[in-house]
Every structure is written in C-alpha cells, then in structure tokens.
Amino acid sequence: MTQQVARARLPTAAGEFQLHLFAGADGGKGHMALVRGEVSGRSGLLVRVHSECFTGEVLGSLRCDCGPQLAEAIRQIAAEGAGVIVYLRQEGRGIGLLDKLRAYNLQDAGHDTVDANLLLGHGADERDYSAAAEILTRLGLRSVRLLTNNPAKIEGLRRHGIAVSARVPTLLHVNAENAPYMLAKAHRMQHLLDLEPSGGVAPGSHSGSYPGSSGGGYLATDSGGVAGGLVVAEAVPSLRSFDGLAALRERIARHRARSASRPFVTLSYAQSVDGSIAASPNRPLALSGKASLTLTHGLRAIHDAILVGIGTVVADNPRLTVRFVDGAQPRPVVVDSRLRTPLDASLLSGGGVPPLIATTDAASVENERSLAAAGAEVVRLPADRTGRVSLTALLEHLARSGVRSVMVEGGAGIITSVVHERLLDHLVLTVAPLLVGGLRGVLDLGTDAFPRLRNLEYQQLHEDLVVWGDPAWDAC
C-alpha cells in the first residue's frame, strides 16, 4: 500500500508545483508525484508516468531520451495549468542501475536494448504501474490524458483501474547515440514512434549525423512521413487505407453462413525476403514496421480467435490482444502438446480474454491444474501421427465452441502444419526488406504439392510488402 509521507511547494523554471512523496510498506525508494494546480476530481488532465533514469536526467547521458522527455513533460503540464507527473523509482525499465550499466556494456558489444536485458536474465521491460495507478487514485483524478508513446503503459494503468481517455504523443529527441535505442523501442517494443531513415546511418550504428545537423541519419517524422526534425509522433496510420480488411470481413461472414464444421482460417505472419521468420528457433526477431503491425491488429479484430504454437509463446511472450485499433478482443488459442506454457506468460496475466490451451492426453495433469488456476481453459484433444495436437480436431472443437474465424500467427511448426494439412482459407503475408538467413516460416512439407496463390492483391505499407491471396488447392 502506497502512503503519502510528505508534500512541499516546488518552484521550477517552468512554474510552481507541489512535490508529493509516497512510500510503500516495503520501505524502499519512494515514488513521487509532481503536481501542478488543483487536480482532485478533475477529468482528462495531462499526466506523464515517468520512470527514473539517473544517467539521462542527472548526468545528461545521450544514450536515451529520458532527460529531455521529463523536461518536456514538465513544460507541457505547466503550460496547461494543471496536471501530474508520476515519478517511479524504476531505473533501467525496472532492472536497477547496476544491471542497467551492465546492459550498456552489452549494447556497446552489439546487442540492442531488448537483447541486453534478456541476456542478463531480465524481461525486456520489468516496470510495474500499480504504484502509479494508486498514486493517481489518491490524488483524486477521474481520468487522464496520458503523455506517452508506449501502448504498454496505457494498458498497465487501465489494468489497475485508471481511465485513460486519450494518448498524447511525446516529442522525439533523437541523436547519434540514442538512435539504435529508439529504433529498438519502435520495432521490438511497439512504441508508437516514426523513425524514417534519411540516409547515412544504418540501424545499430553509433556514427553519423542526425536531426539538427547537415548530414543524413534518422529523422523523427509524423505519420505522413514528412521530415521535420524533431516533431510529435502521431498515432498509428488509419486502417481505412487497408483495402483487404473489408473484403476479408465479408468472406468470413459468408463462411459463417454456409459452414459450421470448422472456422474460416486466415494465416498471417511476417517474413524476410529470404523467407525467414526468426534468426534462429526460440529467438524473436522484429520484422514488421509500424503500419504492418497496425494491420496485424486490424486482422486480429475481425477474427474470433488467434492461434499460435507454444514456441511462439516461449520465444515472444505475446499478449495477442488488439491494441493499435478499435475492435473486439479475440480469444488466444495455444497449441501446447506438453503443457509448457509458463505461468507468468503475458497471455495469462495481461488482463485480456482468457486463453484456450490445446494439449494431448500425454500432458502433465499437474501442469493442467496450474494453468487452469491461472485462468486458462485447458482442453485435451486427439494427437496426430507425430504426437502433437491434431489441428483438425482443434478447429472442430473451436467450431463447436462458437468460434467461426481463426487467425493463425505462427510459429514455423504451426504455419507448416496449416499449409500441409490444407487448413487455410486465406493468406496475408508481410514481406520485410531484409535478409536474415534464419528459420523459415514454412518448413519441408514432405511433398511436391505446393499450393499456388490466386486472387492476389499486393499492398505496400511503408517499406513492407503485404501479399493477400487464396491457396489454390485444386491446382496442387
């Protein structure tokens, strides 16, 4: 339980604030709230939830954008006359200063900010927003406009009862040192940032010139891609330009009307131009750009369920929710023949629709009980000749449960089985412009009967190419 232990007037260069200090029962570092004006009982106030960064805020490190973000938040809230900055003592996205410095060394050795945390045994982001929600509640705010580019922060506050009425983008502060960090936030942590290459610096490079200089580099742009130095990152592009969604929604509706034996199956995944979906098994690889990720969320919203394999859950720890667009939340379905789903998986703790985990009779009864206690529905189904869950039996079970459309997202084993068993009705394939030489999306089918695609449509979303098509099984 967080309790306020002190409060004092704090004049700043931007204006006068009240600084509130809160302490938890554990006696650890106190969180703080910098409050401007009268906030109790107010709705729609501008709020920033900011995590401590000693290196960026005190020492002026250029490796991140934390110091400029905090200063900009103070300026914006002061200009509005009322608002709150909640300052959480969660250094290094929750891993602490010691491991943050160790992570810096790993980044200098070539790893990005996400992999550096993972190599140290941490999650990509271990921050918790329960204390922030409790502080905002104690301050009496009815709803907030959250100053952030991070969708996970919005979800974290909402999960703890805070009404977030709008997202206000934060300014981007890009330089030659923090560009790889910013790119990793955009491409691997789904922060809503536009970082358009203007030439001269490759992702991961620590050299070159950036906005404000005369050379090339990465420019922070708006959602229309117009370079303007350091500008506000707008919300993700509107789905009204994604022509395939309306047509696919109509096809699903027609399938519902004529078939009850199995759901309509859409296979959707991203690969490199050489067919790789990962650098190696069980290691995630960010491929899609922001517009393509938005399309993925639009596809999720028009399906009843999302189906993935246990390898995807272990490697990526996905939430499988609809976040970037408005729409219904599909039910996550995991094919887990041996019940290896971790009890701390985001699917179980993310506050979304409870997942269905499909397994076989060979799976552990104890694991089944633990997963059921964590909120999952575990169903035992017949196994195929390899001992894995029969996808045909799973689709039939889903149809009996009222599921009329399923979006299959991976990984390689599930993708291959869906193709090999001729279970897909439509393919939405995103091709990213890079060469990986890693794990293929479709493995050896053990047959020469490769399906061609017909009714093809092509769509370019920034640098990605999206291919829409139907498998021509009768031509195999």
Image (cartoon, rainbow, N blue to C red):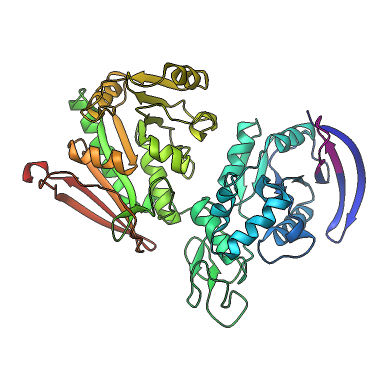
Quadrant in which the C terminus is drawn: top left
Left or right relative to 53: residue 328: left
Q: Quadrant of residue 286?
A: bottom left
Residue at image position (32%, 38%) is: 408
Q: Position of residue 21 (x, y in %)?
A: 86, 41
Q: Residues in magenta?
A: 20-32
Left or right relative to 256: residue 157: right
Q: Is residue 243 visible?
A: yes
Q: Is residue 91 magenta?
A: no
Residue at image position (73%, 60%) is: 56
Q: Position of residue 428 (x, y in %)?
A: 28, 48
Q: Nearer the viewer, residue 422 or 259?
A: 422
Q: Nearer the viewer, residue 393 or 138?
A: 393
- From what the image shows, is residue 50 above or below residue 408? below
Q: Nearer the viewer, residue 276 or 23?
A: 276
Q: Is residue 71 visible?
A: no
Q: Quadrant of residue 45?
A: top right
Quadrant in which the N terminus is drawn: top right
Q: Position of residue 200 (x, y in %)?
A: 49, 78
Residue at image position (29%, 40%) is: 413
Q: Position of residue 221 (x, y in %)?
A: 53, 66
